[in-house]
Image (cartoon, rainbow, N blue to C red):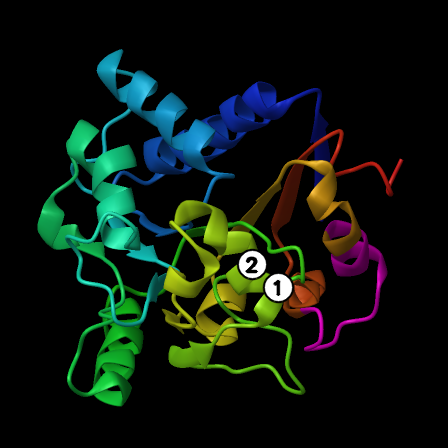
Amino acid sequence: MRVLIADDYHEMSRKAAAIVNSQVLLKPDCVLGLATGSTPLGMYRELIRLYQNQAADFSKVTTFNLDEYYGLDKENKQSYAYYMNTHFFNHINIQRENTHIPDGLSADINEACRRYEQRIAEKGGIDLMVLGIGTNGHIGFNEPDTNFIAETHRVMLKKETIQDNSRFFKSAEETPTMAISMGIRAIVQSRMLLLLANGEAKADAIYKTLKGTIRPEVPASIIQIHPNVTILLDRHAAKLLL
């Protein structure tokens, strides 16, 4: 496990983009697992800049997103499908048929989750998984629980997650309470993990993830068993490690 500490968010984002682009350069038809939220926005902006400068080519890349809100249409401005299009896919040369995001509106959610797992398997798994982390230690929308859930699944979001995400909505009451999340198995079977965190609010979760025991009450702690993990933090998120 490598822990890299950047001076600030901009440097963290630049280093993250360099790691992702290195994977694409080494394997142009690689499979990327992608995260949403505020943390990876700088990374996506930097990857777009690299593409515009002809230093990155996503034409053969396949992507699988970690999660999507349950009940939101992909055209909803708060959906993660809209987020990915707005902040990344619309600005690069990726083939849209190669981008995959869980379907939060499927009439048969269990079948939709099964198909998502199947598509990942058909692509041979994920080469590089980009992860964020919640203040309660969740990765994707794998929330603290009494056991790790292996498969893609529908999840009831914890109060802390709803509160954290409410800043993106008009009110806490409008914030979705359920989501579809890639399970732990596809994450830990990815060939490389890149976990990003910035801000003092993430410091406790990072400390428990890296220094605590592996337990489902801190879902991100599962990354301790992975043989190829890079943790990229700004100094605020790393404050309890220093």
Q: In the visual, does 216 lie left or right of 196?
A: right
The magenta segment: 206-218
- 99 vs 28, nearest the viewer: 99
Residue 233: quadrant of the picture:
top right
- Real-space CA distance between mark 1 and mark 2, rounded to the nearest whole angstrom: 5 Å
Label 2 residue SS: helix
Q: Is residue 73 magenta?
A: no
Residue holding disc 2: 163
The quadrant of the image that shows the C terminus is: top right
Residue type beneath disc 2: Gln
Q: Residue at x 81, y 52 (%)?
A: 207
Label 1 residue SS: helix
> How far across and down, in percent of the image, does residue 144 sit?
64, 74
Q: Residue at x 70, y 33 (%)?
A: 4
Note whether residue 29 is visible: no
Mark 2, other Cα within 10 Å: few <14 / some 14–19 / many ≥20: some
Residue 83: quadrant of the picture:
top left
Q: Is residue 180 above or below residue 191?
A: below
Residue holding disc 1: 160
Residue type beneath disc 1: Glu
Mark 1, other Cα within 10 Å: few <14 / some 14–19 / many ≥20: few
Give yes or no for contact between labels 1 and 2 (Cβ–Cβ under 8 Å). yes
Q: Is residue 179 above or below residue 223?
A: below
Note whether residue 9 is visible: yes
Q: In the visual, does 13 lie left or right of 4?
A: left
Q: Is residue 210 magenta?
A: yes
